[in-house]
């Protein structure tokens, strides 16, 4: 039981640390600094930890894997949505410098 308690404490502390980071991103709505490959890797790893916890019958690993999966999935989805909106916005409104360059080329 002592080893199991250590596992639950580790899972709880790890998730709490991650939740604060996620909360900050959700509150600000700024996903520009989020690394999609890193978050996708964390999501994939947490899914594998869930599977490992199921097959090894380790509740602590299953719990932390489930928590990380439930936290990581929305972040990955929101980052993809943010990136898609940014691509559309950049197509509609090109940077000012490129607009000036195109105007200058037209005058020459």
Image (cartoon, grey):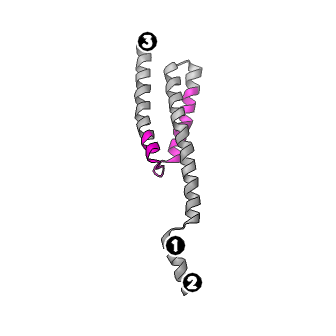
Residue at screen point 50% across, 44% down: 38
Q: Nearer the viewer, residue 104 or 92?
A: 92
Report x, y in % for residue 52.
56, 25
Per the model, the C-alpha gap separating discs 1 and 3 is: 64 Å
Per the model, the C-alpha gap separating discs 1 and 2 is: 12 Å
List the residue tagged with mark 2: 106
Residue located farthest toward the bottom when viewing the structure as drawn: 108
Q: Is residue 46 magenta?
A: yes
The magenta segment: 23-50
> First in sequence: mark 1 or mark 3?
3
List the residue tagged with mark 3: 1
Q: Nearer the viewer, residue 81 or 68?
A: 81
Report x, y in % for residue 96.
49, 71
Disc 1 to disc 2: CB gap under 8 Å: no
| Pointer 1 local density, CA inside 10 Å: few below 14, some 14–19, many at least 20 | few
Which label sits on residue 98? 1
Residue at screen point 54% across, 80% down: 103
């Amino acid at each position: 039981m002592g080893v199991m308690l250590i596992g639950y404490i580790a899972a709880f502390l790890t998730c709490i640390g991650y939740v604060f980071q996620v909360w900050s991103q959700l509150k600000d709505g700024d996903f520009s600094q989020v690394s999609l490959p890193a978050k996708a890797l964390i999501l994939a790893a947490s899914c594998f930890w869930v599977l490992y916890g199921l097959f090894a019958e380790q509740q602590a690993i299953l719990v932390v894997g489930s928590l990380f999966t439930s936290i990581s999935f929305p972040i990955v989805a929101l980052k993809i949505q943010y990136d898609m909106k940014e691509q559309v916005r950049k197509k509609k409104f090109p940077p000012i410098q490129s607009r000036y360059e195109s105007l200058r080329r037209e005058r020459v």
